[in-house]
Image (spheres, rainbow, N blue to C red):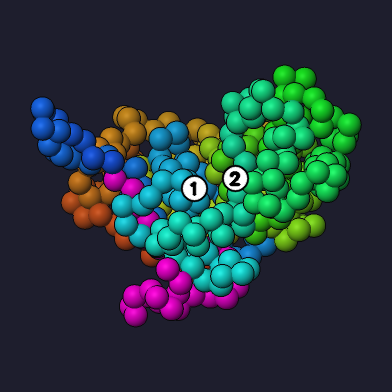
Amino acid sequence: MTLAEASPATPPLDDADLLVVRDLRKYYPITRGLMRRVVGHVKAVDGVSFSIPAGKTLGLVGESGCGKTTTSRLILRAFDPTAGDVFFKDKALGWVNVPRLDDARLRQLRPNMQMIFQDPYGSLNPRMSLLEIVGEPLLVNGVASGPKLRDRVAELLRLVGLRPEYMTRYPHAFSGGQRQRIGIARALALQPQLVVCDEPVSALDVSIQAQTLNLLADLQEKFQLTYLFVAHDLSVVEHISDRVAVMYVGKLAEVADTEDLFLTPLHPYTEALLSAAPKPNPRLRSQRIVLSGEVADPANPPTGCYFHPRCRYAVDRCRIEAPALRELRPRHLVSCHRAEDLQLQGVPA
């Protein structure tokens, strides 16, 4: 489905954006009994909306199970969404609505949307050499074969800091950081516009994390890549992201430019996350905010604001009425009834 085929009610899209996500939802049915009757739904992603300008990075953060990875896979259409739109500005097709593309158009789109996986061990086939792993996207899409394929793989390996003669080796011969570089080379093989980074450094040592993040930043500048960077480590997100979106139980709690969000958070959940982030300067120690209770169950979320059972600022309205994501300051969106009244503590970005 192209933009021209979209509903007339679809708001216009900004040409500066590469990706626009609107009201994205993914519900998994809960069945019971012999007839597998649907008795409820797990709301893994529940009305998520954001945009990413071309050449920029959006960091998507939150606790484990909040729906970050599901959101990223819905964008790539690894899963079909229950509802919502994912508009992508393809360099050949123009604006397309990814969930409504037929198989032929989707195959044409896929080279321009690639993913770097979290696990550098499980994401590489141990029975394939580097030539086969990195060259497979080129071969499958008919981009290169034979000597041209070897030359392109050698170029990609140099690009990520690996020696071309490694292409005959297998994944077991490499460290975790080197394996992740192989994954990055594979993601860049088809020269994509959008790269979804699903916690690409969480399984790596801290020193290797910094090298990998610097590599991603250099590649973004060189090839004008656009990143959706999924992570739970705020220090990592701060380093690489232009904007940050904070998720809680399938919904967006806050979206803002990185510096603005770190300095002046507007949502109590963001404040709690920032208080838990390590501070390299001992003079910047702040009081740790320990959230009470458990993360809400997406199969049976609380009424009103999903965060209210754990929020120390909650009032009666929070327990009854669900807050809408609204722009409280320029480019700073928040989903909290009391955002205007609260003075929350941030950290220097």
53 left or right of 310 in image: right
| Number of the front mark, 1 or 2 | 2
Residue type at the position of mark 1: Ser
Q: Is residue 183 above or below residue 4?
A: above
- Mark 1–mark 2 distance (CA, rounded to whole Å): 9 Å
Residue type at the position of mark 2: Met
* Residue under the point 35% across and 60% down: 84
Q: Which residues are magenta?
A: 1-27
Q: Quadrant of residue 136?
A: top right
* Residue under the point 73% across and 41% down: 135
Q: What residue is disc 2 on?
A: 115
Q: Farthest front residue? A: 146
Q: Quadrant of residue 159?
A: top right
Secondary element at tag 1: helix
Q: Position of residue 348 (x, y in %)?
A: 64, 48
Q: Is residue 313 above or below residue 322?
A: above
151 left or right of 198 in image: right
Q: How many residues crowd mark 2 within 10 Å: few (<14), some (14–19), many (20+)?
A: many
Closer to the chain start, of discs 1 and 2, is 1
Can residue 283 be seen here? The reply is no
Residue closest to the eye, 195 or 309? 195
* Residue under the point 53% across and 34% down: 276
* Residue under the point 45% across and 33% down: 64
Q: How many residues crowd mark 1 within 10 Å: few (<14), some (14–19), many (20+)?
A: many
Q: Is residue 38 above or below residue 262?
A: above
Q: What residue is disc 1 on?
A: 72
Q: Quadrant of the N terminus?
A: bottom left
225 left or right of 303 in image: right
Q: Farthest top residue? A: 172
